[in-house]
Image (spheres, rainbow, N blue to C red):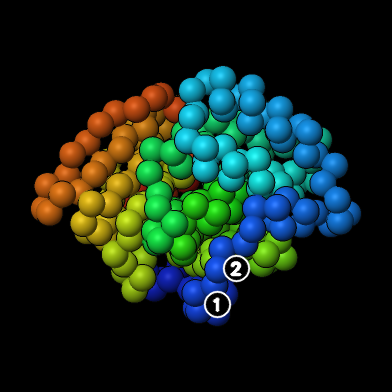
Amino acid sequence: MRWPSHRHRAMDDTRETRAKPKSGAIGQASSEGHDEFEATRHAMVETQLRRRGIVDKEVLEAMDAVPRHEFVPADFRNRAYEDSPLPIGEGQTISQPYIVASMTAALHLSGSARVLEIGAGCGYQAAVLSLLAKQVYTVECRGALATATAQRLSRLGYTNVHVHCGDGTLGLPECAPFDAILVAAAAQSVPPPLLAQLGEGGRLIIPIGDTENQELQIIERRGSAFRTRTLEGCRFVPLVGFHGWKDSSAR
Ligand code: SAH
C-alpha cells in the first residue's frame, strides 16, 4: 500500500466552532425520518453498558443518542446493536458498543474538550465523542473510508467532527494540543507524536499489545510526566503507519 504524504488532508472545510447538536436531533437523523432502532438501542445501553458497570450518565446518554445502525454497511444494519464488533469494509471493524463506551468514559471529557481520534473507521466513535466534547478531530489512513465517513458525519449533522486523511501515528500537529486522544487501533507502543500533542492534564487511551491481543492503557499528562494505568483486555485491528505496524498484512 502506498502511504500518503506526512501532511494530512482535511476532508471538510468546517473550521468554525458550532454548538454541539442536541442528542434528540441526532437520534432522529435516520433516513426514514423516524428511528426504528430506538428500542433496540435503549436495550443495548441497559444490558451491554449499564449492567456491565458504565455509570457515566453523559456517556450513556450519548450511546443512547447516536444511531449506530447509520454507521454500519446496509447488510449489517439489523445487527448494529449486537454485543460485538462488525465489519465496515477494507478489512476494518466498528468496535463493540461496550468498548466504545468504556474508552469514552475513561477520557473524563468536559464539554469544552478538544479531542483527537486516530482511526476514524466509519465515524461511530467520533460521533459519540462529539456529543461530549467541543471539537473532535479524527484521522483515517484509508482514503475511501475517510471520504465516506466525512460524508456520513456531515449528513447526520455532526458538525463538530473534522475528518482528516493521513497517518494518525503522526498525530495532527496543526490542531494540537488536545485535551484527550483516543487511538482506535492496536499499537506495540504509544506513538511519540501523540504524547507530544497531549495538553497539560490531558488523557490518552490506546490499545497496546501484539496484533492478536491488547490491553487498554490510559496515560495522563502532568507537566512532563506521564502516568500510565492498564484497564481491560481488548482486540483491535492494527495501527499501521510510521510509528505503527509497518505492514497491514501483519495481522
Ligand atoms: N473508531 C472506528 C473504528 C476503528 S477501526 C469506528 O468507530 O468505526 C480502526 C481504524 O483505524 C481503521 O479504519 C483503520 O483504517 C484505521 N487506521 C489504522 N492505522 C491508522 C493510522 N496510522 N492512521 C489513521 N488511521 C489508521
Where residue 75 sits, quadrant-wise, is top right
Q: Amino acid at mark 1?
A: Thr
The reply to whether residue 219 is visible in this rendering is: yes
Q: What is the crowding at mark 2: few (fewer than 14 residues within 10 Å), some, or many (at least 20)? A: many
Q: Nearer the viewer, residue 118 or 158?
A: 158
Residue 83 percent across, percent down from the top left: 64, 26
The answer to whether 10 is drawn above or below residue 123 in the figure is below
Contact (CB < 8 A) between labels 2 and 1?
A: yes
* Residue named by callout 2: 159
Query: Callout 2, which amino acid?
Result: Thr
State which tag comes first along the sequence, 2 or 1: 1
Camera-side residue of 169 and 54: 54
Give the spatial CA distance, label 2 vs label 1.
8 Å
* SS for dot 2: loop
* Residue under numbered circle 1: 14
Badge 1 element? loop
- The residue depicted at 72 percent of the width and 58 percent of the height is 25
Q: Is 222 on the left or on the right of 107, as rendered?
A: left
Q: Position of residue 93 (x, y in %)?
A: 60, 40
Q: Which residue is located at x 78 percent, y 33 percent?
A: 39
Q: Position of residue 147 (x, y in %)?
A: 63, 66
Tell me if 68 is positioned left or right of 76 in this view. Answer: left
Could you tell me how many numbered marks the image carries? Answer: 2
Q: Give 180 or 246, whichever is nearer the viewer.
A: 180
Q: Residue at x 47, y 35 (%)?
A: 56
Spot the residue most to the right. 32
